[in-house]
Image (tube, rainbow, N blue to C red):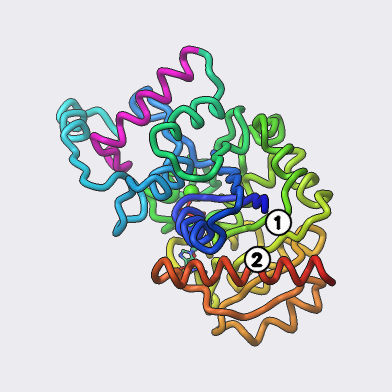
Amino acid sequence: MRIVVLAGGIGGARFLRGLQQAAPDADITVIGNTGDDIHLFGLKVCPDLDTVMYTLGGGINEEQGWGRADETFHLKEELAAYGAGPSWFGLGDRDFATHIVRTQMLSAGYPLSAVTEALCDRWKPGVRLIPMSDDRVETHVAVEIDGERKAVHFQEYWVRLRASVEAHAVVPVGADQAKPAPGVLEAIASADVILFPPSNPVVSVGTILAVPGIREAIADAGVPVVGLSPIVGDAPVRGMADKVLAAVGVESTAAAVAEHYGSGLLDGWLVDTVDAAVVERVTEAGIRCRAVPLMMTDLDATAEMAREALTLAEEVRGA
Ligand code: GDP
Ligand code: CA
């Protein structure tokens, strides 16, 4: 079975681990969000690709959900001693090596997709990880600080400001000119199932869908497209997804997120059991819906979620 997953960082990565347990023989292609990418200290950092790579490759800091396990921060301290910022973005010594190799390869002319493949040669994530695009796309958030309206990089909004100010707009800068990376459209066209994990619907899955051609390819693939709600009990399970959902005019409910994707894209939607009351509303929107436990508390629980998603996909296929 060929499964394509559109993934952001932590939520996407953890779900993928469950999917691998649920479908050990599946051929999984992950299309990763690169809208969170940022240049720091002259290096290209791809937080979401790295979170997927480290999580599936066994190098992740498990408690934190991002960054390397067994990490030290000497380099960061030395940079700070020179007054070289920013200090708000956590880059550890081990993690730095990834960004150095990536930047070196990009400077030598390799596209990001080839660089990602090379980095995965070391981590062996057990999936094919492809960035959504080799072209630069950068998510910016329009905010108002001290009465002044300005756009900040997504990482500055998320990590430095902790989404503490209202987001007026979320713009994937460069997306309209970006092309899907080699392999993206081919993977979608040959997929048996397409899954949207519990990733951020705006700044992760939404950004991937903003690359011209990807949304259309998924809608036209003619295979079941099933998503899992990142909103449980009217709030994000972790992070501040409600802030960016508000910016695009979507309420933070499992039903509203399903309707935001729409029946033109989604065939099936899983909501948590606490949201069982919305199953009817989602079904009326033309999306097959089921309420099952959606908390990724451990690997077995996550694998069960993946199994439910694949079961729903089979139901869609049979319908
Ligand atoms: P990021 O790039 O690290 O923000 O990660 P993602 O884009 O993959 O998505 C994070 C989203 O996953 C957030 O909106 C969370 O609410 C959601 N999430 C995290 N853990 C869980 C969980 O255990 N269950 C569900 N249903 N959603 C989760
Ligand atoms: Ca992210």
Q: Quadrant for residue 156, please give it.
A: top left
Image disc number at residue 123: none
| Coordinates of residue 250 in the picture (x, y in percent) | 65, 65
| Coordinates of residue 42 in the picture (x, y in percent) | 37, 22
The reply to whether the C-beta atoms of the residues labelled 1 and 2 are less than 8 Å apart is yes
Q: Residue at x 78, y 68 (%)?
A: 316
Q: Amino acid at mark 2?
A: Leu
Q: Helix or strand or loop: what does disc 2 sit on?
A: helix
Dominant secondary structure of the residues highlighted in magenta in the image:
helix
| Quarter of the figure that contains the C terminus | bottom right
First to last magenta residue range: 87-108
Residue 184 in the magenta stretch? The answer is no
Taking 272 as reference, is 63 above or below it?
above
Q: Is residue 284 left or right of residue 293?
A: right
Disc 1: which residue: 193
Q: Residue at x 58, y 79 (%)?
A: 292
**Camera sees residue 169:** no
Q: Residue at x 23, y 34 (%)?
A: 93
Q: Residue at x 54, y 25 (%)?
A: 114
